[in-house]
Amino acid sequence: MIISGQNLSKSYTSINALNDVSITCSAGEIVGVVGANGSGKSTLFKILLRVMKPDTGTVTINSKRIKPIGGIIEKPALYEYLNPYENLKIFASMQGLETNRQFFLDSLTKVGLPLNRKDPVRNFSMGMKQRLGIAIALLNNPECLVLDEPFSGLDPIGIASLHKLITSLATEEGLAILISSHILDELNKVCHRLNVLKYGKIIQSGTTQELLNKCTTAYVITASNIISSSILNTYNVTFKNDQATVIIQPGKISELLQILHSEHINITSCVPEISMNKLFEN
Amino acid sequence: MKNLIFAEVYKLFKQRKTYYAIAAIFLIEIIILFSAYSQGQSILDILLDNLSQSFHFEGNLLNGNLLIYLILNTLWFHLPLILIIIISGTLTSEYKDRTVLSVMLQPISKWKFILSKYIVAILFTLTIVLFLAMTSFLLSYAIFGKGDLIVFIDTLNFFESSGAYYRIKYAFLFGSISMVFFSVVSLTLAIILEETTKTWIAAAFFLIISNILLKVNFNNYFLDKWLYVKLTDTWQYLFYFEIPWDKIYWNTSLIIVYTIVTMLVGIIIFNKKDIA
């Protein structure tokens, strides 16, 4: 285990932002924290990143590196008047990193930033800023990366590309990665484990698959001839164009798909519908 | 620490507002020189009409030394105001853009980071005063030449040209220490208030109150000797006929101590604060 936060609590003047929260993340693992706005995600991550002191609880980071942990809180905070190269250079120099030009070019390439942009980062898209923020977080080779809402403000291409980057950092470089989001769909594609945070408390946790199965109440099956299926009429189903939304338990979807196949239904996709009420109920 | 100081200098000189501040200081100088060139002689003639009937003045009184003295008087308000805007901005802009959070996410100690900001603030202040001194000497002597200096402090004081140069030079030196004090106070206010406008208002208010209280006669030995406002005009003592060096050394030592204490308070507050 690289990082562990145990029994973390934090109160502000009028609210209890975190209440006895425990969370862990191991090398090569991607752990997600999902919660609505104001659920305490950023407070939790600030405490894990040690820029905020908890009222109670401890954070343990099992790393002997100079920089055990790197991260981004809410959105990447960059020197907007500097270009990406200069931003990397200044953050590296502040921590006394021995570097050269090639090092910075490699860092930019690693996160998929173009090398030909010499203009200030104030002109950059949010996706590019997120990438530069990650490059800065990765300076000095941390073993753990904490990304708070990394997908916010990104277009679908940006989200897909960031998914790929995060996955490769965990699988290829063995980083322990903690990500938060208020949108479950973004997390379930990359996370091995998920924690659901509500009003400062973790109300559910487990592997991504376990949580998805627990909270899936229906599946949307797409097929051009879906309306001709007879088996679907025995389920609680609603049709819309080429899609059928079937209320069925996750354990029985495989059997239904086989029957649909035997009925010569040309299925092109089957997407679980997750009940947010179930996910966020205590 | 050296890396942090270099980084702070790099950031300071990469921002346009730093150059705007330098340009503003230079522009104030130019305006003073231009006003003196166009109207100075007639004003001096009115002021000295009676005296010139009784005394003989060597050379033209509207000379470089008088002009440098007029520029030196920007140390009362104009220069510290520009300095507090720039110096407090080095931190409030980091709070606004949240880069202070990005910095604190790196393996950098909080006290070293803020100490480096204080060091750069002091170096920048000294550089700006040096810039003001050099440009005012160069431009004033080039345009108006040298001559005797007439200064009104309680009474009219006349100094020969060589003595005037010596006094002005030291006035800039001791004035720079007062400017450092105001810069350090503005950075400490930025640590406490974080927000740009609030910090500007508080720092400008501090400067105005200091200037007002300076003129108040407390008739109290302790306040007159120890209150900071009575120490920020030490550079003016260089224009008394007899320079009170003991008073100058005492005031300077005390304001240096106050500056260090203000820095320490700022460092302690910054260290205790959550960066969120």
Image (cartoon, rainbow, N blue to C red):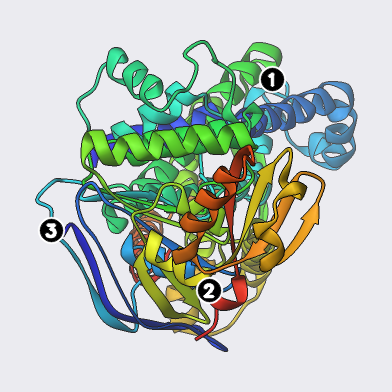
Q: Nearer the viewer, residue B37 or A21?
A: A21
Q: Closer to the camera: disc 3 or disc 1?
A: 3
The answer to whether A265 appears left or right of A171 in the picture is right
Nearer-the-camera pick, B255 or A280: A280
Q: Can residue A14 be seen from the camera position used here?
A: yes
Three-letter code for the amino acid on which mark 3 is drawn: Asn
Residue at the far left: name it: A64
The quadrant where residue B202 appears: bottom right
Specify the quadrant of the image occupied by residue B82.
top right
Mark positioned earlier in the residue sequence (2 or 3): 3
Pick whichever, A92 or B169, lies toward us: A92
- At horizontal 50% and vertical 32% (from top left) the residue drawn is A161
Position of residue B135 measured from the top left corner of the image (x, y, whole percent)? 58, 22
In the rendered structure, the residue with mark 2 lies on which chain? A
Which residue, given by chain and number where applicable, does mark 2 sit on? A279
Against A40, residue B67 (above or below) is above
> For the image shown, how many numbered marks are present on the structure?
3
Q: Residue at x 60, y 71 (%)?
A: A276
Nearest the viewer among B162 and A113 is A113
Q: Chain of mark 3?
A: A
User: Residue B138, relative to residue B81: is it above or below?
Assistant: above
How packed mark 3 is, by other alpha carbons closer than 10 Å (few <14, some 14-19, many 20 or more), is some
From the top left corner, tell me how far across and down residue B233 is, in percent. 54, 57
Mark 2: which amino acid? Leu
